Image (cartoon, coloured by chain):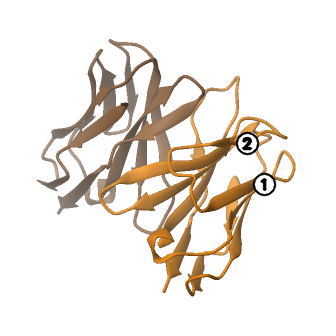
Amino acid sequence: NAGVTQTPKFQVLKTGQSMTLQCAQDMNHNSMYWYRQDPGMGLRLIYYSASEGTTDKGEVPNGYNVSRLNKREFSLRLESAAPSQTSVYFCASSGVGGGYEQYFGPGTRLTVT
Amino acid sequence: EDQVTQSPEALRLQEGESSSLNCSYTVSGLRGLFWYRQDPGKGPEFLFTLYSAGEEKEKERLKATLTKKESFLHITAPKPEDSATYLCAVLLYGNKLVFGAGTILRVKS
């Protein structure tokens, strides 16, 4: 039982390049989330998916797109990376019934130069 | 605007020196409050959920409490392995979490 997995762990991009961050969970959770974490600002929600087939914007969605590929997988895409998107990105998932707590992956550290 | 404020930003303790971390919030529609622990270079690790004022949860040297306006994470006789960043988050309607910036705890032996 791996929980929430994310790939890659580290990535360096040049301004204007695109990339997709991958996330998968094996806990049969309905809801999945993407956050970014910046020093002194805490975790901020980018997008979330309450269930398979639905996605919604969070607090800071500009410059990102998401795809809920199936119940297990939720990807985050940067179409044209900017230095302001340098951050640590975390994926999380939660299930209804057992509680609303979210379980987090190990993160992807992204640097945009 | 929903806001979560944690204090202090950083806390240094000697091993065995008990203390408390604070999480205050101004939100509409609080459904619950979570505490997480985050080690450097890792994702947040879930510790506790509190759903109503007066509720308390304990785990080893940690105890979390909740009032109508704030939550405390009490650390009793801490050890160096308790060093981490502690995050609190409030659960709003729509199952969204709003996080505080965290308290960095360092426990020296």
Q: Nearer the viewer, residue A96 or A54?
A: A54
Image position of B1 with respect to B56: above or below: below
Relative image position of residue B42 (x, y in whole percent): 49, 63
- Residue located beneath label 2 in the image: A55
> In the image, which lettered chain appears orange?
A
Q: Residue at x 46, y 23 (%)?
A: B32
Disc nearer the start of the sequence (1/2): 2
Q: Are marks 1 and 2 in contact (CB under 8 Å)?
A: yes
Task: Kindly tell me whether residue B50 is visible in this rendering.
Answer: no
Relative image position of residue B100 (x, y in whole percent): 34, 43
Quadrant of residue B73 within the rendered picture:
top left
- Residue located beneath label 1 in the image: A67
Task: Name the residue type under label 1.
Answer: Ser
Relative image position of residue A48 (x, y in whole percent): 65, 44
> In the image, which lettered chain appears brown?
B
Crowding around mark 2 (Cα neighbors within 10 Å: few <14, some 14 to 19, many 20+) is some
Image position of B59 with respect to B37: above or below: above
Q: Residue at x 73, y 42 (%)?
A: A55
Task: Kindly tell me whether residue A63 is visible in this rendering.
Answer: yes
Q: Nearer the viewer, residue A98 or A57?
A: A57
Secondary structure found at label 1: strand
